Image (cartoon, rainbow, N blue to C red):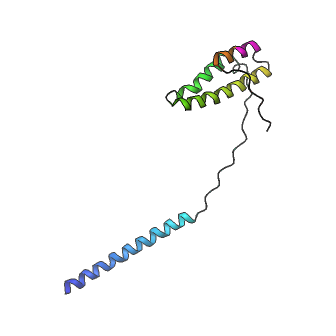
Amino acid sequence: MQQHRSSQRRQMPRARQLLLLVVVCLSIGSAALAEPAKPPRPPGKPTIYQPDQQTCQVSTITAAYQRHLAPFADQPEAVKQKLRGMQADITSRTIERCLSQGLLSASDAAQLRRKLGLGKAPAPAPAR
């Protein structure tokens, strides 16, 4: 009988410890849930880089087009096709900016479009 009472005394502190642990965990969890989520940052205004003589060289544009697609060579064909489309749009707009600033000749622009398979000049970018 005495042994039973001493084991009860030992269990009470353990029960209290367990209760205390549960209360602490619940209070930490509820505090984390109570914090409001931070709203996402608004997108920044896109930067349009103005090309220079070096950027507008046929070799530079060709190398950049290929270099930007190279890291994705191991991706599925659908992904590569989407990336080629995006890169083609970027490159076409670069060619147009180079042409408009007189940094690239019309014949070089046509050669680049053929070589990279870009097709016709892109539609003008929407006004911002």
Residue drawn 58% across the image and 24% down it: 67
| Quadrant of residue 34 within the rendered picture | bottom right
> For residue 92, what is the image quadrant?
top right
Q: Can the viewer see residue 105 in this picture?
A: no
Of residues 123 and 52, the one nearer the viewer is 123
Give x and y (percent) for residue 36.
61, 62
Instruction: Return the residue found at the far top.
Output: 107
Residue, far front: 78
Q: Is residue 29 left or right of residue 57?
A: left
Q: Quadrant of the C terminus?
A: top right
Question: 41 or 112, which lies in front?
Answer: 112
Majority secondary structure of magenta residues: helix
Residue 102 image offset from top left, x and y in percent: 79, 18
Q: Residue 114 location in percent, x, y?
A: 67, 15
Residue 42: image location, x then y, percent: 69, 48
Query: Residue 105 colored magenta?
Result: yes
At x 41%, y 70%, the residue is 21
| Residue drawn at point x = 24 percent, y = 83 percent | 6
Q: How many callouts does the rendering have?
A: 0
Pick the quarter of the image with the N terminus.
bottom left
Give the vertical position of 79 relative to 105 (above or below): below
Q: Which residues are magenta?
A: 104-110
Choose between 125 and 33: the one closer to the eye. Answer: 125
Residue 66 visible in the snapshot: yes
The answer to which quarter of the image holds residue 7 is bottom left
